[in-house]
Image (spheres, rainbow, N blue to C red):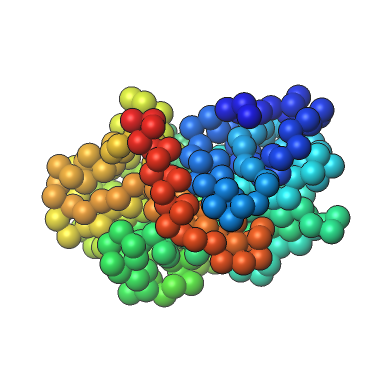
Amino acid sequence: MKDVYTLDDLRDWRESNLRYAVLGDPVAHSASPAMHNAVLEHLALPERYCRLHISPGQLAEAIGLLPRAGFLGVNLTIPHKTQILPLLDQVDAHSRRLGAINTVAFCDGKITGTNTDGPGIVRAIHEEFGVALGGLRILVLGAGGGAGRAIATQCQIEGCAALLLVNRTEQKILELARNLDATVIPWTDKALADQLANIDLIINASSVGMKSGDPSPLRAEWLGKSHLVYDTIYVGRQTPLQTAATNAGASSANGLSLLLHQGVLALEYWLGRPVPVEVMRLGLEQFINRKS
Ligand code: NAP
């Protein structure tokens, strides 16, 4: 199995046991194969999971080719989570409301999609901080992206006490904020510094922090001990935002718990049965340990 396959590989697919994949650009860093393959192996299933590097202009062709190549399901990561919507035959009502799809199944000639990032963040926040989203005052950074949109909507569904949305391109979140009865604040030092005093939980769903050398999207001096800081990014041991949170004495976690729980829910969607969370967690931990 190659580390990363491409659209050219998919056009002439020869890997008979690779039936699941993560599609993205970039995708080489993805831990998804390690965690899904740990469970598939544990369940003695013959299918395996791989990475497919698919750029934005290639998504429609890839989605057409995948079922013909024998794929049963795929996950979508940057930048495909919203672009996939018009390519699907069926989307459940909850995922349509979240406005982004990260899990697709190919079954009986139909292409169906669901969102496991939304339910995944509920489990991740509870696991990391021992709290429920309901009742918290939450700020979502990067709320205009596929993950941010779904996470912000899930926070509102869970009954958060206040919801503040921030996005580099503010235009992208105006309608979302209206639908969610949320407040938009500009991505400026002053607005962030002023608003953070009234926030319990900060969720970074922007991709700031993914590339090496990226700064923290928030400065340590704006953060305090009472903040819970969740960075959906999981590249490296500590993300720049986590470093800022640690310097401020705030509690923080990276996106590994979201990755785990959205993955568990995705595999359950494809297999139609519960999967062992701890086996997937071990597969993920082994991958992270090998990388570091
Ligand atoms: P996406 O749809 O491409 O959205 C990217 C987001 O990042 C947008 O809000 C974009 O703002 C913002 N952004 C990009 N570069 C920026 C910059 N230089 N300054 C400020 N904002 C910037 O991607 P996505 O699928 O939602 O993923 C976003 C992040 O969430 C990624 O880091 C991904 O790893 C993480 N994620 C993690 C998990 C997990 O399992 N842990 C799950 C889902 C997502 P604009 O709208 O202005 O472009």
Instruction: Tell which residue pokes out farthest to the front in this image.
Output: 44
- In the picture, measured across the screen, residue 5 lies left or right of residue 237, that is right
In which quadrant of the rendered image does the N terminus lie? top right
Number of numbered markers: 0
Along the viewing direction, whichever of 50 and 100 lies nearer the viewer: 50
Residue at the image point whose x is 81% and y is 39% from the top? 69
- In the picture, measured across the screen, residue 91 lies left or right of residue 109, that is left
Along the viewing direction, whichever of 54 and 184 lies nearer the viewer: 54
Residue at the image point whose x is 62% and y is 47% from the top? 75
Residue at the image point whose x is 30% and y is 50% from the top? 253
In which quadrant of the rendered image does the C terminus lie? top left
Give the percent coordinates (x, y) of residue 107.
79, 57
Give the percent coordinates (x, y) of residue 229.
28, 53
- In the picture, measured across the screen, residue 95 lies left or right of residue 111, that is left
Along the viewing direction, whichever of 214 and 22 lies nearer the viewer: 22
Give the percent coordinates (x, y) of residue 7.
73, 29
- In the picture, measured across the screen, residue 274 lies left or right of residue 20, that is left
Question: Is 218 rendered above or below residue 44?
Answer: above
Residue 208 in view here: no
Residue 63: which quarter of the image?
top right
Residue 57 in view here: yes
Give the percent coordinates (x, y) of residue 289.
35, 36
